[in-house]
Image (cartoon, rainbow, N blue to C red):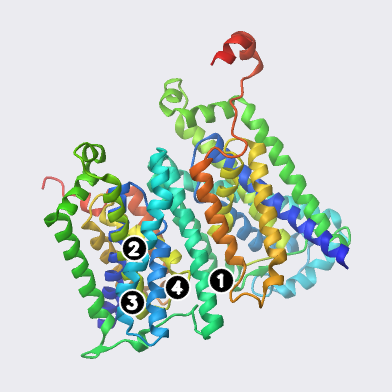
Amino acid sequence: MIETLVGGITLSSILSLMAIGITLLYRTTKVPNFAHASFVTTGIFAAFTLHLFNQPIYLGLLLGFLLSGLEALLLFYLVLEPLRRRKSSIFILMMATLTYDIFLFGLINIYADYLQYTYKATARNIYLAGADFKVLGVQGITVVSVITLVACLFALHIFLNKTVFGTALRAVMENDSLALASGINVSAMLAISWFIAGGLAGVAGALLPLHIMCSPSTGMILIAAMFAASILGGLEQLYGAPVGGFILGLAETLLVTGLSSVLGPWVMTYSGMIPYIALILGLIFCPRGLISIRVRGA
Amino acid sequence: MALELITLFISDLLALLGVYTILTLSLNVQRGYAGIPNFGLLFSFAGGAYITGSLAARLGLLLAGVGTDIDPISNSVGAMAVLNPILRSSPLLTITLTVILLLIGAVTGALLGLIQLGPVIRLRIDYLAITLLALGEVLNYIATVYKPFINGALGVLVPDLFSWAGSEYRFMVATLEILLIAFLVFLYVEYLGRTPLGRVLKAIRENEVAATSLGKNLVTYRAIAMTIGSAFSGIAGALWTLYLGAITPSLQRFDWTFLPWLMIFLGGIGNNRGVFLGTFIFVLINRLLVYIKHYFTGLLPFDVVWFDYISLGIVMALILIYRPQGILPEKPRVPGEIKEIMGKQSLEER
């Protein structure tokens, strides 16, 4: 039971890191970013490449942050900014992020093929838990994932509230025309938000192969869970994302283990359905997030 | 030998073109006419494909009146050995089975389309896209986990319904049947666009408030568009399973949602000829890439198929930025009577 709980907390922390980026981008650019899938996968391959060349895996957090942040910047400047200048609809912007995701998916798969072909690496079954360190009999990833989440949230909070850039970014989130009128460079602020969100997805991706088996399709498989976490937390609430991440992560581990001990082991095989069910129910019954539900009379 | 290969290449190309044309036309009814951005096209397509996989052999055995204790799902090889010779010798039985399966595919697609209607009428476009994309994956999941449906990840064989004219003509017959159905769907969708119903759908797309003020119920008309569109996509799924002769729960979002969207964007949303042109261009490029693929094996340290993803991603981004209306944009159609009332002059002034 303790083991399940520990696994659940690790998964929840990683999911939260992904969901924060989605919520942040939704607040700044008003677009659900489907390219988050490939940003996460990029992080996975950052960690895997370092491991392949005998470097410390946890350097992957930094490499993943930079690479995915760069990918997000490229998406913003090459595709989204020209579309924004043409006053394209949200629908077109959304298609554009989906398109960029497909493009990156192709690149990542070529890279995976290349690693397999040239270095005989198992680039389609990436699991690095064996290379992890141990603290008091617990896998290092458990401690690191929680610390990373807390550190990232803290850094984001300081950035948004104590710096000039952060204040400007919050102004853009609230009302971009007004921000533009007060002389804030809206385009630059949006670019910063894309870099941060992409970077956080890269960090989450770099942590992932230490916890579960990964492949070039992992990001695509997880995208529903990322959106589910983000929506459960409330797409308008930046700090709601970790709440959604933990609800989903714990539901997928604790709830399923609990149910299967009552109803039988067949429940386990359907555990992958949880993000989809949570997403659909969440969107239909409380699209503004669980935080929006208030006790009547309170 | 070379000639045979070319015939096979062309018949494969045309079959794929037919299936994709039905699918893009179904998307055109939903997005092009009614303005519903169905990002979950895979849902009804996979529904049609999997239900056909699940029922084809069972129905075949039932119709042929064969009493056998072979389970057509877990032992589909055994069931095919019994069923295929019977079907080959009886064109009538084959065609009856084909028609029944296509009808079941259409009904399944339509029902799944109605399930999607819940989110469609409630949610804003961004939330809707997320929901429909996620819904699309659910069927793959269920079909993989629930073994009695289509035998889990291993998949099932389905009876060969195109060999009634002799097995050497199998692919030619299949291609012709698919093209015929695609042509009928094209005629119907083109007709639908000119009917009063089609005009109401387009009116809702252009301005919901104006359409409501004229007494048009948004929910009813969206339900109609979703049902018609999803039924066609269910038929496309059923045809795809029958054409392949087997199905596994691995239909991809890229192939069956993203590509159709790309095709209608390239050709021109709302214009059926444009949609067909876009479909043709993409299927041709895709098949040529597959065809030349083996020339590159061993030369490059990766699979050439991934170029498909990269190039399509770039093409799509360019279309979105520079020509979002497509090659053949939709032209407003003015019915004859209105033209007479308004006179040619006033129309040109518009």
Marks 3 and 1 on same chain: no
In the displayed structure, would residue A195 be above or below residue A140? above
Residue that appears at 56% across and 81% down: A117
Quote the CA–CA distance across marks 2 and 1: 42 Å
Mark 2 or 1: in front is 2
Mark 4 or 2: in front is 2
| Secondary element type, mark 3 | helix
Q: Chain of mark 1?
A: B
Residue that appears at 47% across and 74% down: A215
Quote the CA–CA distance across marks 4 and 1: 11 Å
> What residue would you read off at disc 1?
B147
Residue B309 location, x and y as percent? 56, 61
Can you tell which mark lies on residue A60?
Answer: 3
Say what amino acid the circle numbered 1 marks.
Lys
In the displayed structure, would residue B138 be above or below residue B181? below
> What residue would you read off at disc 4?
A269
Quote the CA–CA distance across marks 3 and 4: 32 Å
Marks 4 and 2 on same chain: yes
Q: Residues within 10 Å of mark 2 (few under 14, many from 20)?
A: many
Q: Chain of mark 4?
A: A
Q: Chain of mark 2?
A: A
Residue A4 location, x and y as percent? 29, 79
Give the mark nearest the N terminus, 3 or 4: 3
Mark 3 or 1: in front is 3
| Secondary element type, mark 2 | helix
Q: Chain of mark 3?
A: A
Mark 3 or 4: in front is 3
